[in-house]
Amino acid sequence: GWLDGYAVLITGGGAGLGRAVTERFLAEGASVTVFGRDKDQLDETVAAAPDPSRIHAVTGDVRDSERLHAAVAETVERFGKLDTLVANAGVWDYQRRLTRLGAEQLDTAFDEIFSINVKGYLLAAEAAWRELVKTRGSIVMTLSNASFYVNGGGPLYTASKHACLGLMRELAYELAPKVRVNGVACGGMNTDLRGPESLALGDRSISASFAKKGPDSAPPLIPLHDSSTDPRDFTGPYVLLAARDQSGPITGHAISVDGGIGVRGFAHAAGGDDL
Ligand code: NAD
């Protein structure tokens, strides 16, 4: 595989996109440490892995630097090094608008969303960079359509994912030439993505909104109307960006995997609907 012998750490590796990336990286020959706050999810991911010697789980919160340092140390202990950090764990704001947020809610939800989505990536990068310098490795961050466009979240999520884009670009500069830093800007995926506890949305899963859509629902307002929402179909760019042989000269770049939001029309989302 493209990642034979790679040692990788994935935050939020126990569910949704992180789990899909974990499974894909294992299939490409990598050894993977999955990090997350839900122990059951991590245990399930480890149990499902075809080769138990190439997977390891570390429980912790991405806001807790000590746990992230432990995850890096255990990866090096088990697999000898760290080639790739996939910074991925995050929460959504369920598109809660400014006009539906009180001042107090804004205050607490801002802190929760920014500390998970933005500080979580920064703390993971801090824990990992020394090992990544040794291997001339790389960081791949999960970004979002909300890193570029409005209405994929409310102000809190959109600002947090724009911040992640800036973080990716700044770290690409600061860690060059030894460590590459890139992003994958995903569109809507049917995962277990949760909301912030501070808005009482910690138990709500984005998967419920996909379940509501019947077969007769209007196609999504993106050029690739029938684009997949299965997180497994979003993993290819992670493999590409992690693999030195495939993307050695790429750094500071985000690959959008969103059904073409950037080439959407005005009256019609797709210009070729009559083809
Ligand atoms: P998910 O909930 O299925 O997976 C996220 C994982 O991160 C879970 O295992 C969760 O337990 C873990 N996690 C959450 N907060 C954590 C914390 N504080 N500490 C440790 N672990 C934590 O959701 P997903 O959709 O796979 O989300 C992965 C990434 O994809 C996020 O950054 C999200 O913003 C991004 N994203 C998702 C979508 C979508 O439509 N689902 C679209 C664009 C971007």
Image: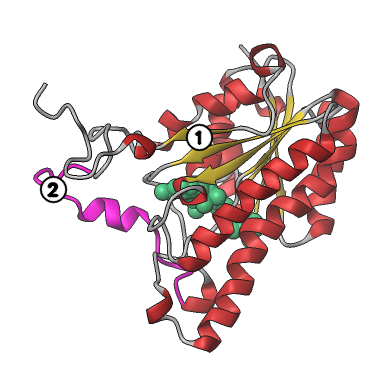
Which residue position holds label 1? 20
For residue 217, the mark is 2
| Highlighted magenta segment, given as a residue range | 200-220
Residue under the point 38% across and 80% down: 100
Asked if residue 50 can be seen in this view, the reply is no
Closer-to-camera residue (98/50): 98
Residue under the point 22% across and 40% down: 269
Q: Position of residue 78 (x, y in %)?
A: 83, 31
- Where, quadrant-wise, is the N terminus in this rendering? top right
Closer-to-camera residue (13/154): 154
* Overall secondary structure of the magenta section: loop
The answer to whether residue 231 is left or right of residue 67 is: left
**In the image, residue 111 above or below residue 174:** below
Tell me the crowding category of disc 1: few under 14, some 14 to 19, or many 20 or more residues within 10 angstroms, Cα based: many
- First along the sequence among labels 2 and 1: 1
The answer to whether residue 16 is left or right of residue 223 is: right
